[in-house]
Image (cartoon, grey):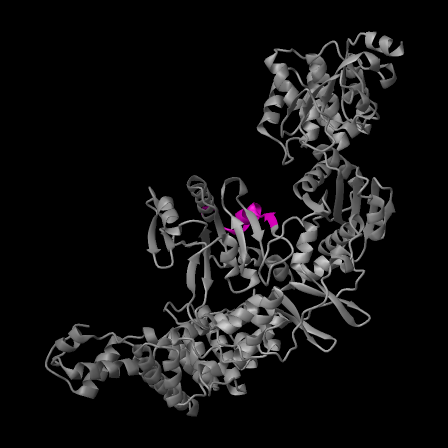
Amino acid sequence: MDQQNASAIQRDVEVITTHVNADFDALASMLAAAKLYPEAMLALPGAQERNLRNFYVESVCFMFNFVKVKQVPFERVKRLILVDTRRLDRIGPFAKLAEDPEVEIIAYDHHPDSDQDVRAHWQQVRKIGATVSLLCEHLRENNVELSDDEATILALGIYEDTGSFTFVSTTPEDYHAAAWLLGQGANLSVVSELITRELTAEEVGLLNDLIHGAEPLNISGVQVIVTEVSREGYFPELAALVHKFMEMENHDAVFALARMEGRVYLVARSRLHEVDAGVIAKALGGGGHPSAASATLRDMTLVEARAKLEMALHTHINPSISARELMTSPVISAPPQLLLRELPERFTRYDINVMPVVDGQDILGVITRQDVEKAVYHGLGDLAVREYMTPGVKPVAPDAPLLEVEKALLEQRFRLVPVMENGEMIGVITRTDLLNTLLERPLISESIGEGEAAPQTIRHKNIANLLHERLPKPVVTILQQMGKVGDDLGEDVYLVGGSVRDLFLRSDHLDIDVVVEGDAIEFARAFAQGRDDLRLRTHKKFNTAKLLFDSGLTMDLATARLEYYMSPAALPVVEHSSVKLDLYRRDFTINTMAVRLNGRQFGLLIDFFEAMRDIKEKVIRVLHNLSFVEDPTRVFRAIRFEQRFGFRIGKLTEALIKNAIKIDAFRRLTGSRLFGELKHILEEESVTPAIERLNEFKLLRVFHPALQLTAKQLELLDQAEETLAWYRLSFIDKPLRRWLLYFLALADGLDEQQMTELCQRLGFAPKLREEITEMRAKALRCVNVLQRRAARPSQTFELLRPLGLEFQLLVMAKTSKDYAKKAVSQYLTTMVRVRPELGGQDLKAMGYLPGPLYKQILDTLLAARLDGQVQTRQDEIDLVENRFGQRKGELSY
């Protein structure tokens, strides 16, 4: 009987509602919906935000059919209109109506989809700054007229949810809606008063930063949002702003870190039972409830706080899986003295790719199939395993949580981690074991597969603003144009290598390298088509191109490629590949970043190999253990980068450098490749520290066995640097080969025969070898003369005039006498410009017949000028007549 009565009840009521803790956008959307559904009741599902309890707002809402929840006849509701939300868990008591199959659900929302969304019969959902902007479109289409007060309330919703059009979520539709409301009579003075009362300009900026800095993390299948902001002053409304951010973006769990007044504050909010905000905050020294918590982290940077927060998230969201559950047993291992050529059979027999190197119970490191195969391929099979193992592996305990295992495997760049119990290795965990687990319960957002330097995740970050800040505007424009060409061709285009590295190091080097996942030559031709401001050069063998712009800018374009080496120290064989493998062929992790140039993803930083981490830690690391065997010139680049950037070479990389020296990997390098690297070092801003580092590694002998850095050579290098500093300040406008001066200083201790051998080893052209041999001998004689006593200016002139500029500066650097240095400086700054007033025509007019005598006379006049013996034209005439006899002829004065 009751069921029959229930079915007999007439359903004739429409209800408009929104989410709990309604804000201006929610309220404005309800009022806009009421204009479209004039018969509907309006009911707030719970408490409204503090700023809604305002006399003006309440007085306007009084004109609408607002009722309390208890006044809604739930059994008669036929239609539920949801605005600014679709989530079942956010509409309070109206959730039971949303689940009633006899109730029609209509929704207007601007929040992203979620698992908690109701199943609406009709909905309009769009990524837009405010939901009320959507409804304004319908009001405009239906020619609905608004009163001034109604238009003002609707404008309030737009202004609040867009941060007065400053939030990154703002769209053109929000501007159009606001313009229409202004035409309907919206009072911007009232809007400004109410919005400003709620949020100051600083708070609006802080809220926008919270939105812009948001990064999703996938932890055990649960998505949480972590965001960071930094301010000098303290903001007491931080918690309210985090809550507003969470509501605006419809997030389930938000963890905000804010550096303020020297401390880092955590504000945590969660709607998920899997994410207990209180427990996570407690792990960071704070506390709170499962849905809201906070913590204060003292004596900690934002980076450190972020790392600690992520550790807590991983630990407390998914602490159940332990190392014992993941490990493989029994363990297949290798002793350190085993020869490399004996390992491939062991790898194949047990079908494994990595194994620990064990000496008794001591775990010395790990060795991979990839490194072993490369070493054997390069003829190094008779070396012991210890030579190419990766040392420093740290074991974990059997009860270690999944996060600790993940960190050991990925952050420490090992492909295997031992499990130790009571001093005994009871198992190992490989990347395969971890990835099989993460497929079902992922802790990380994106695994990248193989590679010795492979990190735990691909790092993504948009640095478009940094590009605009650090690069000249014309360069950014060209990069954007390249991205558009890539879109047109359906090819991905990236800014790569040192140009990306230098953005973060604030270096002014402007070497622009671009990689195309396609044909670089065809791409370059498409880019250059129709442009008259550049010239194009191509290199078909390597499928590369160079763009030479009229402005002086040059850009190198390359096809994404993979390189492998037929033998140690040989030039690489090149094959087409992807950008990831293109980056993996590079020398050091800090040079492996790429920036996407295509369309909407312009400025997206891709960091496969933890380059950003190494930049922050100021470390030079190679990507794989045979890097220096395959290309020994990388050793010199490692030292050059270390000194240029003030970094340090990592421990393993340093050990691999020493190994390359031990096996004499440099013996097969051609002279031109050796010289190329040495020249790069000698052209650095500060040369001496790099030369000292070469000497520490005993690398100078690679160039010549007798080349060494004695105290005398070190002093001469310092003097050469001071001489070059003087030269720059003297504004002498002559081209200078900086590297040659440093080269002469470095090799100063070699005798003539040894210098000739060094020049031959470096592949110098015969003309350069001849110049160095001849000029060096003259420079040394000049030093000996100038050192003995102060010479007359004319003597100094005669000594220095035959020398090239670099050899003149060598004389200045080598001499220890101040008067000698002064003599060279006077020659370079003043003597070279001294000329006699008389010339050949004058001598002819004086009756002297043309011939060798002219040179003798002019040299005499120049010497007299330099020594101050003549001052005027008449003085020169008198000197010539007295010295060379008076001839018949007249000379006008």
- Residue 305 pos. (x, y %): 75, 54
Classify the position of the C terminus by image quarter.
bottom left
Residue 465 counted in the magenta span: yes
Counting from the top left corner in percent of width and height, residue 714 is at 52, 82
Residue 693: in sight, yes or no? no
Q: Is residue 550 magenta?
A: no
Please give the count of numbered marks on the rendered protein: 0
Image quarter of residue 678 = bottom left
In the displayed structure, 187 sits above or below 665; it is above
Does 111 sit above or below residue 550?
above
Residue extending farthest to the bottom is: 788
Image point (16%, 73%), residue name: 841
Depth check: 820 or 216 in front? 216
Residue 50 horizontal/vertical position (percent): 82, 28
> In the image, is 633 to the left or to the right of 144?
left
Where residue 832 sits, quadrant-wise, is bottom left
Q: Residue at x 55, y 75 (%)?
A: 341
Q: Residue furthest front?
A: 349
Chief secondary structure of the magenta portion:
helix
Q: Quadrant of the N terminus?
A: top right
- Where is 436 relative to 134, above or below? below
Question: Closer to the camera, 511 or 735?
Answer: 511
Left or right of 567 on screen, residue 454: right
Residue 132 seen by the camera = yes
Write the start and end of the magenta stretch as one range.
460-474
Q: Position of residue 389 (x, y in %)?
A: 62, 72
